[in-house]
Image: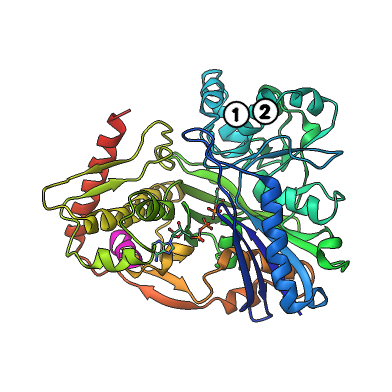
């Protein structure tokens, strides 16, 4: 028997079957369309997401058969917001993606009305277009008839986990989990309830919200998509929390960084919700068996997507992986810095208006410099986040567990370790997000016994240790800080 994880990410959907040892048995992946209706807006068609998920599940079932699947775990791009008609099941607007900036003015208004403290204290977040609340508000305001339908109880809201479970159970379950709820800006992470006061301030009716459940329990059973097999859907977590779980960061003080489209560093803070003074988010790591654990999170909006920009925008790379060789072809960045603030800056700046910039160009600058500087920017942004994290938690990081598409890049990993001054550890199974979701589903159904069993299975594939003299990394990092400061002046 296997556990099936569905990882519904920003650019692609994956289905992965894991065996008892936590190894990948089969994997299927499908990209889907990104919509950019206006500058700074990012949207998805939720039906296309569902089709892509159906297609990867179908591909896997053609190899495995549904009878061999013991349970399903779901993990998803977080915050991305969808409203659909309860009766017809049709979305009333595209899903507004986490990266999208179309609700910046709504957030500005909420800040001016003085809601920031309440939001921070109750949800652990800051008011930003990143989170679901302003996206819901935008749809209710801008889609004709949406407000009336919502008030009549005819609309349902969901992040993508909710949409997938609803589709897979044919509308029987309208649920989410603590981690996804904690990214809506509507959920009180201390009392574990939708916050009625925030809902009323934001004009969002509670009737559209899903029921919030733990991360590891049976929410419902599949129907048609599995050839009629009733397979339990038994784990849900937002992708960054799932990766923290898949990396077996079970002790307070353990942290992981995922290098995908963006970069997300989460540190487990145990039963304590640590509030940040340095632009980090306080969020739910997971809630299992009546116990809630928390995390501090630093969110970097542009990481791997800056490499995609080099490839598809500037067209100076053929493949993302070519970036490693090009970076290594230079002995240094020769003073060139790229600030990839394409959709503003997240932690610790939370600055929606700054845009990308390049500094330090000379007549001798070559494309390799841009490639190297872009990779370095991913590592510098991670250092910004870790500095904030160490200050807020008072914890000195012992090592950083890493995962995501861009960790294949050895230049990036080595530079990251040099810059942070701690070992950077890449695990054998890089699909930690899916693995985390599989573990949550497997724990709920007795496929795995407990977390100890999982922690023992975690294995390092490669450890990068600091090599560069501290004087050099200090100088490089100062250059980055100057570059960010200068980029922020240009608005
Ligand atoms: N060798 C590499 N070097 C640098 N970046 C890479 C490399 N391979 C993949 N990437 C980047 O990693 C990202 C894909 O990672 P993935 O974890 O699949 O992202 P997501 O889950 O956000 O869709 C892409 O943005 C891509 O540019
Ligand atoms: O789909 P990813 O891996 O880019 O992750 C997106 C994050 O969940 C956004 O908060």
Asked if residue 105 shows in the view, the reply is yes
Q: Quadrant of residue 186?
A: top right
In the rendered structure, are the residues bearing label 2 and label 1 in contact, judged by CB atoms less than 8 Å apart?
A: yes
Neighbours of disc 2 within 10 Å: few (<14), some (14-19), many (20+)? many
Q: Position of residue 466 (x, y in %)?
A: 28, 68
Q: Describe residue 455's horizontal placement relative to residue 448 as left or right.
A: left
Closer to the camera, 139 or 442? 139
Q: Within the displayed image, which quadrant is ligand 1 positioned in?
A: bottom left
Q: Position of residue 465 (x, y in %)?
A: 32, 71
Q: Describe residue 301's horizontal placement relative to residue 113 as left or right.
A: left
Query: Residue at horizontal 71%, vertical 33%?
Result: 195
Asked if residue 250 shows in the view, the reply is no
Query: Residue at horizontal 75%, vertical 27%?
Result: 146
Q: Position of residue 212 (x, y in %)?
A: 76, 46
What residue did someone put label 1 on? 118
Compared to 142, does 363 lie above or below? below
Compared to 25, does 238 lie above or below? above
- All told, the count of numbered labels is 2
* Dominant SS in magenta: helix
Distance from disc 2 to disc 1, alpha carbons, whole Å, reads 8 Å
Disc 2 or 1, which lies upstream in sequence? 1
What residue did someone put label 2 on? 198
């Amino acid at each position: 028997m296997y556990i099936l994880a569905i990882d519904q990410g920003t650019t692609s959907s994956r289905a992965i079957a894991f065996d008892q040892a936590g190894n990948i048995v089969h994997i299927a992946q499908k990209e889907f369309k990104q919509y950019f209706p206006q500058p700074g807006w990012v949207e998805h068609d939720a039906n296309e997401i569902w089709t892509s998920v159906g297609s990867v599940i179908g591909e896997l079932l053609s190899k495995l058969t549904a009878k061999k699947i013991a349970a399903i775990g779901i993990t998803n791009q977080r915050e991305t917001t969808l409203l659909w008609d309860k009766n017809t099941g049709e979305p009333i607007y595209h899903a507004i993606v986490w990266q999208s900036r179309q609700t910046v003015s709504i957030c500005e208004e909420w800040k001016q009305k003085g809601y920031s403290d309440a939001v921070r204290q109750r949800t652990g977040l800051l008011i930003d277009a990143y989170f679901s609340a302003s996206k819901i508000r935008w749809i209710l305001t801008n889609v004709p008839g949406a407000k009336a339908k919502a008030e009549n109880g005819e609309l349902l809201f969901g992040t993508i986990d909710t949409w997938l479970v609803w589709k897979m159970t044919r509308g029987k379950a309208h649920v989410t989990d603590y981690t996804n709820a904690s990214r809506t800006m509507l959920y009180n992470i201390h009392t574990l309830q939708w916050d009625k006061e925030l809902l009323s301030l934001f004009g969002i009716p509670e009737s559209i919200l899903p029921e919030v459940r733990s991360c590891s329990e049976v929410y419902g059973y599949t129907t048609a998509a599995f050839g009629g097999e009733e397979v339990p859907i038994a784990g849900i977590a937002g992708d960054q929390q799932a990766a923290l779980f898949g990396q077996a960061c079970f002790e307070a003080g353990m942290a992981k960084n995922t290098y995908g489209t963006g970069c997300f560093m989460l540190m487990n803070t145990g039963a304590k919700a640590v509030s940040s003074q340095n632009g980090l988010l306080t969020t739910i790591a997971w809630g299992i068996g009546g116990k809630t654990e928390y995390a501090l999170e630093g969110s970097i909006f542009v990481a791997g997507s800056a490499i995609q920009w080099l490839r598809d925008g500037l067209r100076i790379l053929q493949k993302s992986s070519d970036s490693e060789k090009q970076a290594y072809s230079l002995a240094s960045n020769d003073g060139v810095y790229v600030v990839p603030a394409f959709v503003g800056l997240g932690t610790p700046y939370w600055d929606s208006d700054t845009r990308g910039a390049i500094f330090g160009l000379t007549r001798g600058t070559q494309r390799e410099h841009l490639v190297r500087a872009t990779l370095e920017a991913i590592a510098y942004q991670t250092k910004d986040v870790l500095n904030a994290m160490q200050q807020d938690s008072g914890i000195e990081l012992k090592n950083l567990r890493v995962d995501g598409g861009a960790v294949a890049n050895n230049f990036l990993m080595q530079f990251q370790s040099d810059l942070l001054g701690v070992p950077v550890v890449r695990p054998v199974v890089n699909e930690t997000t899916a693995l985390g979701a599989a573990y949550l589903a497997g724990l709920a159904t007795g496929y795995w016994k407990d977390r100890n069993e999982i922690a023992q299975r975690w294995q390092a594939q490669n450890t990068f240790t600091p090599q560069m003299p501290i004087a050099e990394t200090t100088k490089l990092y100062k250059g980055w800080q100057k570059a960010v400061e200068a980029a922020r002046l240009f608005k």
